[in-house]
Image (cartoon, rainbow, N blue to C red):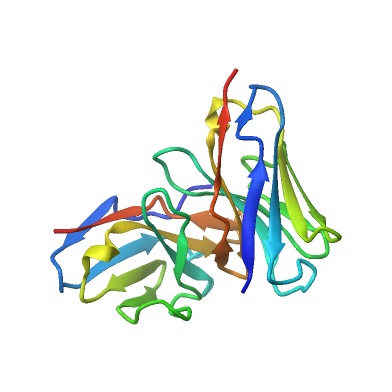
């Protein structure tokens, strides 16, 4: 079962907006609205940032937003801040093989 | 507020069995609101879903690990467990437990398990 495809790295300057993509297939990302996004700082456990493609849990900044088009989901961080520098992972339910897939992760660098 | 905490051996010999427990606090493991999951992360690498167990005891495992994985729930202790047998160095990773409700939240802090003789 292949992982979801994410870019290895994305960078931006403070205040800018960046978007991280997460590409799957019609068996996972494209077929279900069960895409979630996680932020992970070094040495820390992942933290849920977005669930069900677009839902932002309580306590997560409204600078984080999620969307989906076809087989690709996206996480957008607006007004980029130094504290946003971290690894980001997408995840999706899948009806093919494994029940849950993760993306390979994207390292976000704030320039 | 739901909280999860992993415990277990941090060092396992090759070919032996890795055993971890995740204690759930702030909520009942039998509530039916969540399923209970294990995820691992090899050093410097990405996340890998290991499997999850429903409150009723049904289990769903990653096919790549299915032949070696067993998960169980102990409702009396409000905890769930992971056993991974026949381990090799490739199983060295930080192991996380997490609540699953179509997303993973919350997560435990993680426990590093090293497979080495």
Q: Quadrant of residue B83?
A: top right
Residue in the foreground of this view, choosing between A28 and A10: A10
Q: Quadrant of residue B4?
A: bottom right
Up/down of B115 relative to B98, above or below: above
Quadrant location of the C terminus of chain A in the rendered image: bottom left
Up/down of A106 relative to A57, above or below: above
- Residue A36 location, x and y as percent? 47, 68
Q: Is residue A27 visible?
A: no
Q: Quadrant of residue B13?
A: top right
Residue drawn at (78%, 61%) of the image: B78
- Residue B73 location, x and y as percent? 80, 55
- Residue A91 location, x and y as percent? 48, 61
- Residue A8 location, x and y as percent? 29, 50
Residue in the foreground of this view, choosing between A66 and B37: B37
Residue drawn at (57%, 65%) of the image: B106
Residue in the foreground of this view, choosing between A58 and B84: A58
Q: Is residue A45 left or right of residue B60?
A: left
Q: Is residue B95 visible?
A: yes
């Amino acid at each position: 079962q292949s992982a979801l495809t994410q870019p290895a790295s994305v960078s931006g300057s403070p205040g800018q907006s960046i978007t991280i993509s997460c590409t799957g297939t019609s068996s996972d990302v494209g077929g279900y609205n069960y895409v979630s996004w996680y932020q992970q700082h070094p040495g820390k456990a992942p933290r849920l940032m977005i669930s069900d493609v677009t839902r932002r849990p309580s306590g997560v900044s409204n600078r984080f937003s999620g969307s989906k088009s076809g087989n690709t989901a996206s996480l957008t961080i607006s007004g980029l801040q130094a504290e946003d520098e971290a690894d980001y992972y997408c995840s999706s339910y899948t009806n093919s093989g494994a029940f849950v897939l993760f993306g390979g992760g994207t390292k976000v660098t704030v320039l | 507020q739901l909280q999860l905490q992993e415990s277990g051996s941090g060092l396992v010999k090759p070919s032996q069995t890795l055993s971890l427990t995740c204690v759930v606090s702030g909520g009942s493991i039998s509530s039916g609101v969540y399923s209970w999951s294990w995820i691992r992360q090899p050093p410097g690498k990405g996340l890998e879903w290991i499997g999850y167990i429903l409150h009723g005891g049904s289990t769903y495992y990653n096919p790549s690990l299915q032949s070696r994985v067993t998960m169980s729930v102990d409702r009396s202790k409000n905890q769930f467990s992971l056993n991974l047998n026949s381990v090799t160095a490739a199983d060295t990773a930080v192991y996380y437990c997490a609540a699953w409700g179509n997303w993973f939240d919350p997560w435990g802090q993680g426990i590093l398990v090293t497979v080495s003789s």
